[in-house]
Image (tube, rainbow, N blue to C red):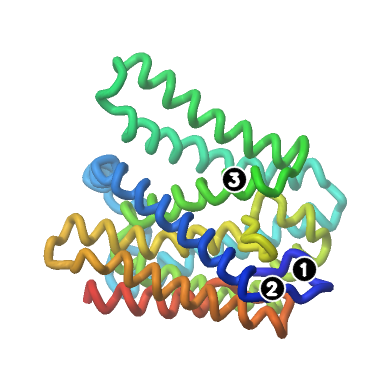
Amino acid sequence: MTEQEPARKRVTPVNLVNAVVIVVLIQLVALGITYENLPSYTAIVASSGPTFAPAGTSETGSFLNASFLVVFAFASTLGLLWVLRRKMVFSFKVLIFASVAISAFLLTFITADSVLAGILPVDQEAALDVAVSMSVVVIVGYTIFIRNRPWLSSIVLAFVGAEVGAFFAGTLDLRTALVLPVVFSAYDVYAVFKGPLKHLVGTAPGLALNGMSVKLGEFTLGLGDVVFYTMIPSLALFHTVVAPTVSPLAPVAVIAAIDAGVLATLLLLTRKRLLPGLPIPMILGVGALAFYLL
């Protein structure tokens, strides 16, 4: 998480409120996506099992699953840094576009199919599903390759991030879903202060953040942060629906906890121009969710 203009400190009450309101709106979109896609997520898990559980679903296996994903994120960031340092700008953009476009198309297709099911004839519905999904991909490509319009890229990337967060919430094993944000929070501290992410942003800030971040007014939020900010509330909603014993207040409480952490992180930007966006929100959010689930 960074300030939009590092040279100027703009952490004001108005900017803080605007940023938190935007995060809340993204989280609400994710809850809507989760609710619409519940049948699809349930079918995916029923047919093929949790989407990522190579080490199983035990406590140890869940930690290993999360660790595998962290290693993948680390290796991917190293690869992007290698490409960028060699001035391979077009290749860098292609890699960013490919990683976002694949998720954008597949998850938007699932969402569009859930929303349009039964409204149109099957053939027309399928065509519209593809058209909507391709529209999102085209917008992502436009902002990366042709012209970076921050407001446009922020909207579409926030939507994609909400879709990914909702998908993880509905298809990951519960233990892995709870461990994953904690492990990534620890990695986030390293990546921002010492790891390749710090060097990636430092090498070419504008290019590195294009296609990988969402503007919150005066602040910039990483796409990975968006995924986790939306995954935990979506996980709360998912289990509220599938387990009637879970309080319907769980999603609201989790959103409040995460956004209190977001606010605290933003306040700390008065002292640092670049901070990890996950640790405080995830400690509070996962803690609130565990209170309702465990």
Residue displayed at 43% across by 79% down: 283
Near mark 3 (Cα within 10 A), the count class, few <14, some 14-19 or many ≥20, is: few
- Write down the quadrant of residue 129 in the picture: top left
Pointer 3 residue:
99
Residue displayed at 62% across by 31% down: 138
Q: Residue furthest front?
A: 14
Q: Quadrant of the C terminus?
A: bottom left
The dot on residue 218 is: none
User: Marks 1 and 3, how far apart in space?
Assistant: 20 Å
Looking at the picture, tell me which residue is in the foreground, 12 or 153.
12
Task: Kindly identify the amino acid type of the residue bearing the numbered disc 3.
Answer: Ser
Pointer 2 residue:
195
Q: Residue furthest right?
A: 87
Q: Secondary structure at mark 2?
A: loop
Q: Residue furthest left?
A: 245
User: Marks 1 and 2, how far apart in space?
Assistant: 7 Å
| Residue 75 visible in the displayed image | no
Task: Kindly identify the amino acid type of the residue bearing the numbered disc 2.
Answer: Gly
Q: Secondary structure at mark 1?
A: helix
| Residue 93 visible in the displayed image | yes
Looking at the picture, tell me which residue is in the foreground, 186 or 250.
250
- Horizontal and vertical percent for residue 159? 51, 47
Badges 1 and 2: C-beta atoms under 8 Å apart?
yes
Residue displayed at 36% across by 63% down: 233
Above or below residue 75? Residue 48 is above
The dot on residue 199 is: 1
Q: Secondary structure at mark 3?
A: helix
Task: Kindly identify the amino acid type of the residue bearing the numbered disc 1.
Answer: His
**Is 89 placed left or right of 152 in the picture?**
right
- Horizontal and vertical percent for residue 88? 83, 47
Mark with earlier residue (2, 3): 3
- Horizontal and vertical percent for residue 76? 63, 57
